[in-house]
Image (spheres, rainbow, N blue to C red):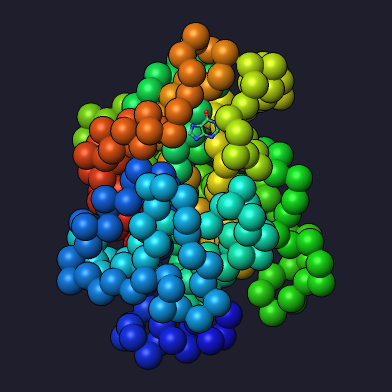
Amino acid sequence: MSDAIDFLRSRISGTPKVAVVLGSGLGGFAHELDEPTSIPYSDIPGWPASTAVGHAGKLVFGQIGGVETVVMAGRAHLYEGYTQQQVTFGVRTLAQFGIQAIIFTNAAGGINLSYSPGSLVLISDHINLQGSNPLVGPNDDALGPRFPDMSEAYSRAFRAAAREEAQRLGIELAEGVYAGLLGPTYETPAEIRYLRAIGADLVGMSTVGEVIVANHMGLRCLGISTVTNMAAGVTDAKINHEEVLEIGRAVRAKLTDLLKATIPRLAA
Ligand code: HPA
């Protein structure tokens, strides 16, 4: 990780305050940064390439409303064969680089029947069903504690700020629990009934590991899901990745406005 940080220091002066991780079909937000400096992941020592369709694979440094911000356009997923260490490498590196707050976005299936494709949902909490945890193994006490508290994994204050900004902008913003699964299959209808029964409102294949390491390192987190489809069995429709990308793009304007308004609130 230190090679990656040395490399970024050689390219970037100053330290971004806020990081934004962009999910499937949401990469367009990178264009919103003022005075952008773009660095492909492939240039950064140790940074895993992101191979999923709809993921760009670059870091973009710049400003949003005058706030130094870095965007991770594209992320590595477990279903691509990456380890939890690789999946969380970017978040760990940016945390060590000095960011203070991080926003995770993702595409998710809607389990809660009050959602519909295109809904934006603030993540209030998560359920890790990936069968692994990035903190397994020896703990580096310099980074964080052996047994991190996860009782406010998604900052209450950040959620309140996002809700206020959404209301001010007239953007409907629901709130719910995100279940993180391994993938790459979408779920079966039986799995969705199970997830609903255990308290999940959303389902996806990312985010939980990254939020775990962010909490481990003391970063405050905000999570926003785009509901790209209703989860399996909720309707008769089959789920396909093209639809996930298309809806992601369709809500881009709404999500962009919300992110632009919320980022300055997190840097205060
Ligand atoms: N399930 C899991 N991950 C997803 C889905 C889904 O229905 N939609 C977008 N990402």
Left-right relation of 188 to 75? right
Q: What x and y, as percent, mark residue 256?
A: 26, 45
Residue drawn at x 63%, y 16% is 189
Residue 167, visible in the rendered structure: no
At a point 49% along the width and 9% down the height, the residue shown is 236
User: Residue at image x 67%, y 59%?
Assistant: 84
* Residue 58: percent from left, percent from top: 37, 66
Viewer-proximal residue among 226 and 224: 226
Which residue is situated farthest in the right direction here?
138
Q: Name above or below for residue 89 compared with residue 251.
A: below
Judged from this view, the residue extending furthest toward the top is 236
Q: Is residue 127 left or right of residue 89?
A: right
User: In the displayed structure, would residue 205 be above or below residue 85?
Assistant: above
Count the marks: 0
In what quadrant of the picture does the C terminus appear?
Answer: bottom left
Image coordinates for residue 47, horizontal then vertical, percent: 51, 72
- Residue 9, by quadrant, is bottom left
Residue 40, can we see it? yes
Residue visible at 49% across and 10% down? 235
Residue 42: quadrant of the picture: bottom left
Q: Quadrant of the N terminus?
A: bottom right
The location of residue 57, given as percent across then percent down, is: 40, 62
Decide if residue 258 is on the left or right side of residue 114.
left
- Above or below, 85 relative to 127: below
